Amino acid sequence: MKKSLFLTGVKALYNKVEADVADHLKTVEGDDIDDTLVVEIYKTLDAEKVTSLKADNTKRFNDGVGKGQKDTAKKFEKKLREVFPDVDEALEGDELLNHVETVSVPALSAKGGGDKPDLTKVTEEDLLKIPVFINKQRDFTKQLKDKDKEKDDAIKAEQEKQTSTQILSEASVKALALLDGKNPILPKDATKATVMKNKLLVEELKGHKFMKGTDGTLIPLDAEGKQLNDANGNPVDFNSLVDGIINTNFEFNKVEERKTPGNKNQQHQQQPGEKKEWTGKVPANKKEYLELLMDPDTDTDQRVALKETHGEQFRD
């Protein structure tokens, strides 16, 4: 793989520049990188990304559980103060529980006398016969099950997200390789060329879903998770999908005719790297935005200008 193509993929997928992967490339000489090394580097970067995602999700989950436990404890302490008015408002946590056990309960039992129950002599077996306690126990069991399900769902969602991220990474690398093979017209400045590739190809791919076939090929999927079909009901393969995006969003270098004195009136062609403002109709909704974006009369620079001006507004 060409080093420039590899660096374009690393920038698009992991937001890393050449200095960030310098250690991985220390054995590379010249402009070509062995495909085996490319695969190993992408696996390493994917693993780093997955580890970061897992750590972030674990922290968010634990923070949520901790807050829920704290809220539950506050409600329980409030209820204790309602039952035992003698409890000092400043007491909380273990101090509050110790005060209720050693001071409040004995005082209430002693004060009751006669037909009042002696709370110090209530056993666990007695508690199991009280309807209020039974309902509380049932509610607590349900809360535990709900928390377990929430955790399982979070783990499953994270696993699916990681798989989707890895497949999209592979799809983007392959799509960029197909694009470079078509010799598109790009800005001479490498940074601007990368920005154009990202906006008009990688960002477009993020709107599609893919799965891996048993032979390792990437299969485009529709919104229902089934294989994507064209208007005639025929399956769309990965290369056809990418070719459609590339042919819609990019222009390509062609062999120029020899200039002769007779064609001095030849129309000026836009040079790579020239910036143009979006001068077309302002789209009123997403449908109009997509129609303008896919219009064959809209050239490459105008598509970039349209995306920069209105793309964020109509993004799902």
Image: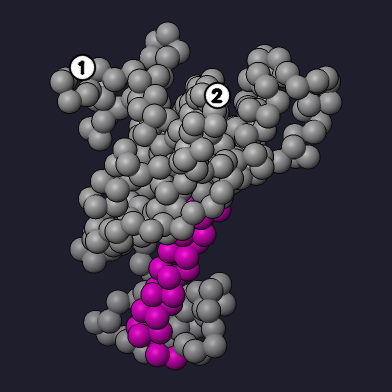
Mark 1 and mark 2 lie on one chain; the one further toward the N terminus is 1
Which residue, given by chain and number where applicable, does mark 1 sit on? 234
Residue 4 visible to an observer of this rendering: yes
Q: Secondary structure at mark 1?
A: loop
Can you give x and y, in whole percent of width and height, for residue 219 in the image?
36, 20
What is the three-letter code of the residue carrying label 1?
A: Asn
Left or right, 175 with reference to 272: left
Toward which corner of the image does residue 164 lie, by quadrant?
top left
What is the three-letter code of the residue carrying label 2?
A: Arg
The foreground one among 206 and 281 is 281
Q: Residue at x 38, y 58 (%)?
A: 279
Tally the numbered discs.
Answer: 2
Which residue, given by chain and number where applicable, does mark 2 sit on? 258
Q: Residue at x 47, y 40 (%)?
A: 265
Dominant SS in magenta: helix
Residue 312 visible to an observer of this rendering: no
Q: Is residue 67 magenta?
A: yes
Q: In the rendered structure, which segment of residues is drawn in magenta?
A: 59-86
